Amino acid sequence: MGCFGLSSVSRYTGYGSNSVSICPVAGSGALSACIAYQNDDIFGPNGRLVFNFAGLPAYIPNYNSGTVAICNSQFASCIGDVDASFSLPVGMDINAAGSFVYVANASSDEVSICEILLDGTLDTCTTSTGDDSFATPTFSISDDLSNPFVHNYNGFGYFPNISPASISYCPIDNITGAIGVCTVFTDGNITKPGSVWIATFDI
């Protein structure tokens, strides 16, 4: 049996509850009754939850408090991590090695690069503007397109930019966590990209 986590404050499940729900997953893929963990001081609306499978903590950005919540795998214990670089943090991802967290800041056009320490907390973060290619709007809860999620895959980070509508893809150093020189991709079919996901399949 697996376990499936839902952030119940995402735009798909409604704002305002400041909670995370954990729902068991059966071998058939069916979900059963969920348990909600609520913490108004730690969880904020519209945060993207990511797990670090190298060390199992979960990380949740909270744009209300400008922090990142760090929780154990059952959400029974959480702390709020503060860094001077966080500015309306709303999107994040973890590198494949589980050694760095990348936090998209909606009001600064910057991504915070934070090393994950042995205890799961975050070291002092550095920032990158993606060679000035990152372009996210000032976050508005009424605009459900303004969620600058990031995604890393195969040594590259992919960063959606709302205006102008584009995707910045940048090499990421797996040892230092640094973001390299970015390339900006535009396409007429990309309009106000709010998130980036990578799927691999045969064509």
Image (cartoon, helix red, strand yellow):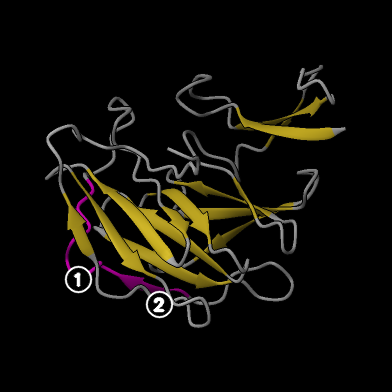
Q: Is residue 153 left or right of residue 117?
A: left
Residue 93: percent from left, percent from top: 50, 54
Rendered location of residue 160, percent (x, y): 29, 47
On the picture, is 106 further left or further right than 137?
A: right
Q: Is residue 129 magenta?
A: yes
Disc 1 marks a residue whose amino acid type is: Asp
* Residue sitting at the far right: 1
Q: Residues within 10 Å of mark 1 (few under 14, many from 20)?
A: some
Range of the magenta residues? 125-136
Judge by depth and name the residue closer to the eye, 173 or 65: 173
Image coordinates of residue 136 in percent, x first then y, are 23, 48
The answer to whether 1 is drawn above or below residue 103 in the figure is above
Q: Which residue is mark 2?
A: 178
Q: Quadrant of the C terminus?
A: top left
Q: Which residue was labeled with disc 1?
A: 131
Q: Quadrant of residue 183?
A: bottom left
- Of residues 73 and 189, the one nearer the viewer is 189
Q: Position of residue 122 (x, y in %)?
A: 59, 70
Please give the name of the residue rendered at 66% of the width and 38% of the height, measured from the top-left corner.
Answer: 39
The N terminus is located in which quarter? top right
Outermost residue, bottom direction?
A: 176
112 horizontally vs 170: left or right: right
What is the C-alpha distance between the residues marked 1 and 2?
12 Å
To which quarter of the image does residue 115 belong? bottom right
